[in-house]
């Protein structure tokens, strides 16, 4: 049995029994914090917390590891609700092409982009993919991430998609954090289906989905709904086929253009709609009538030099907002959610409190982990992070690029 007492915590953040499982609109500015606090964990489970003035005599402290957190903050680990963490190779050559003036969409039209990753993935075995992703996740955890969504979508064939999802299943079984799997067969049309898109959609619906269902490989279904990728009708068809097999939608929409995908995804009960670099009033109204969590990915905007999602407009409409990394080799090669927090504050004018809500409780809602993740409360066992000594909580967002995490308790 391991007992840990973290004492003299400068600020114990998002700890409380009454914290809601999602914060919307103006509520997103609220962040619970107990100053000069303690937190007691037994085998990773929260057994007591509160102000230092109250800690003595609360539990039997014999055999306890004492961590002095003087000057440090403690928060629930962040949740990354949108990543493409399983991939074969990084894509620096496209990065350099973009420096020379090509756009992400132009690179994709030349057979680069997602198809480039799919080619590279087809050359690796399941084991090779598994080991590289495992190493990545070990690093991701060290940056303060305590739950992760991972998408397929670089297979784009029956074998390739199954290979990716089997890797994600193995990662779920062996990594110490919660992982959710999303099937993204509808990520791009493979070159051999360029002139027969119908056949690829049939392959997704008639072959990939049943095989994934048989092996129980996915929790969610995703579609890249975008010009030159999948239309709203394509998305509807694929999502409905997934829903019929028990998968819930979480989708890529409005990255470059507004096609009406947000309304359709909301209508189909999407858990989240992600990207939203472009958004209009119809999207806002559709979201207002739903429990779907809009999720912004500022790492992608930064890396591709495309517009940042309009966080202020979404929050002003009274909606909840989550943030995620979109970690992937093409449009967002960064998994550090502290960087995402900084970008959201600097570029999207979110306050640090809003950003932390977006990366904890609202991100947990975007991954249906509200019952276990996103806040610190008695009986919970989800990962907790301890920062280094920092002057204030806002410093996490302010000192961009600095490594703020000292330790993560899992
Ligand atoms: O979320 N936009 C679609 N999919 C990924 C990028 C995939 C890639 O370029 O490899 C994204 O940005
Ligand atoms: Fe993505």
Image (spheres, grey):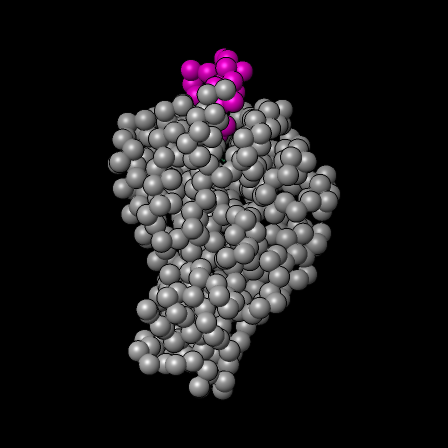
**Foreground: 186 or 380?**
380
Task: For residue 360, say whether it is visible.
Answer: no
207 with respect to 280 (left or right): left
Question: Residue at coordinates 35% horizontally, 72% vertically from top-left?
Answer: 3
| Secondary structure character of the magenta stretch overall | helix
Which image quadrant is residue 198 in? top right
Q: Is residue 410 above or below residue 232?
A: below
Q: Quadrant of residue 101?
A: top left
Question: How far from the left and from the top, in percent, is residue 333?
Answer: 39, 44
Q: Residue at the location (47% across, 33% down)?
A: 183
Query: What is the residue that sits farthest to the top in this orientation?
Result: 195
Which sits in the foreground, 351 or 103? Answer: 351
Q: Which residues are magenta?
A: 186-205
Quarter that holds the C terminus: bottom left
Q: Is residue 378 magenta?
A: no
Q: Where is residue 295 drawn, in percent x and y?
A: 57, 47
Q: Residue at x 37, y 27 (%)?
A: 160
Task: Please identify the quadrant where the N terminus is shown.
Answer: bottom left
- Residue 64, percent across and down? 33, 77
């Amino acid at each position: 049995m391991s007992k840990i007492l973290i004492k003299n915590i400068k600020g114990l953040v998002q700890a409380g029994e009454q914290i809601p499982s999602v914060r919307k609109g103006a509520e997103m500015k609220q962040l619970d914090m107990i100053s000069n606090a303690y937190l007691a964990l037994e085998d990773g489970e929260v057994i007591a917390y509160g102000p230092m003035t109250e800690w003595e005599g609360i539990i039997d402290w014999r055999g306890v590891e004492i961590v002095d957190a003087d000057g440090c903050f403690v928060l629930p680990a962040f949740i990354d609700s949108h990543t493409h963490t399983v991939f074969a190779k990084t894509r620096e050559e496209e990065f350099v092409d973009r420096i020379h003036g090509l756009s992400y969409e132009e690179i994709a039209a030349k057979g680069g982009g997602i198809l480039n990753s799919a080619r590279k993935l087809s050359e690796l075995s399941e084991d090779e993919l598994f080991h590289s992703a495992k190493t990545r996740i070990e690093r991701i955890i060290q940056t303060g991430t305590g739950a992760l969504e991972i998408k397929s979508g670089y297979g784009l064939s029956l074998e390739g998609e199954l290979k990716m999802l089997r890797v994600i299943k193995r990662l779920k079984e062996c990594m110490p954090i919660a992982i959710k799997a999303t099937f993204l067969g509808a990520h791009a049309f493979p070159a051999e289906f360029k002139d027969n898109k119908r056949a690829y959609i049939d392959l997704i619906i008639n072959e990939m989905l049943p095989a994934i269902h048989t092996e129980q490989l996915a929790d969610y279904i995703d579609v890249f709904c975008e010009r030159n990728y999948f239309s709203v009708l394509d998305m509807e068809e694929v999502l409905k086929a997934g829903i019929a097999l028990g998968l819930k939608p979480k989708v890529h929409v409005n990255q470059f253009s507004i096609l009406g995908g947000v309304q359709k995804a909301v209508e189909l009960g999407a858990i989240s709609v992600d990207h939203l670099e472009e958004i209009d009033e119809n999207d806002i109204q559709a979201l207002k009538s739903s429990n779907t969590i809009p999720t912004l990915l500022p790492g992608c905007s930064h890396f591709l030099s495309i517009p940042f999602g309009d966080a202020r407009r979404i929050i002003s409409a009274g909606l909840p907002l989550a943030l995620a990394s979109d970690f992937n080799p093409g449009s967002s090669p960064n998994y550090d959610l502290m960087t995402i927090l900084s970008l959201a504050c600097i570029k999207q004018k979110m306050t640090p409190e809003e950003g932390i809500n977006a990366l904890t409780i609202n991100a947990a809602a975007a991954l249906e982990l509200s019952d276990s993740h996103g806040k610190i409360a008695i009986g919970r066992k989800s990962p907790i992070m301890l920062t280094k000594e920092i002057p204030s909580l806002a410093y996490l967002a302010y000192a961009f690029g600095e490594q703020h995490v000292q330790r993560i308790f899992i």
